[in-house]
Amino acid sequence: TAHIPGEGHAVQEHSIVLIRGGRVRDLPGVRYRLIRGTCDAQGVTKGRWNARSKYGVKKPKL
């Protein structure tokens, strides 16, 4: 099992995703995380200004 960081996602059962190691502290037995913004996992779509690289969000145009 892998944790999907951020708010909301559209990942389904046969989606192709990229996984990295790193456990989630409050979920026992979960030792992997999904990398957002790669393959079929889209980045967080709204309201993300800090820690953008962890959630696959492009730099906003000002």
Image (cartoon, grey):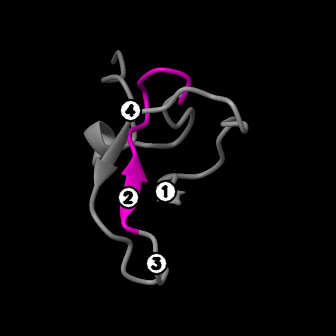
Q: CA distance from mark 1 to mark 3?
A: 9 Å
Which residue corresponds to mark 2? Answer: 32
Which residue corresponds to mark 4? Answer: 56
The reply to whether the C-beta atoms of the residues labelled 2 and 1 are less than 8 Å apart is yes
The residue tagged with tag 2: helix, strand or loop?
Answer: strand
Of the numbered discs 4 and 1, the one sitting upstream in the chain is 1
Q: Nearer the viewer, residue 60 or 45?
A: 45
The residue tagged with tag 4: helix, strand or loop?
Answer: loop
Left or right: 5, with 23 as reference point: right
Which mark's residue is nearer the viewer, 2 or 4?
2
The residue tagged with tag 1: helix, strand or loop?
Answer: strand
Tell me: residue 34, above or below residue 57: below
Magenta stretch, residue numbers: 31-41
Residue 44 colored in magenta in the image: no
* Residue 23 in the image, given as x and y percentages of width and height: 32, 69
Of the numbered discs 1 and 3, the one sitting upstream in the chain is 1
Q: Residues within 10 Å of mark 1 (few under 14, many from 20)?
A: some
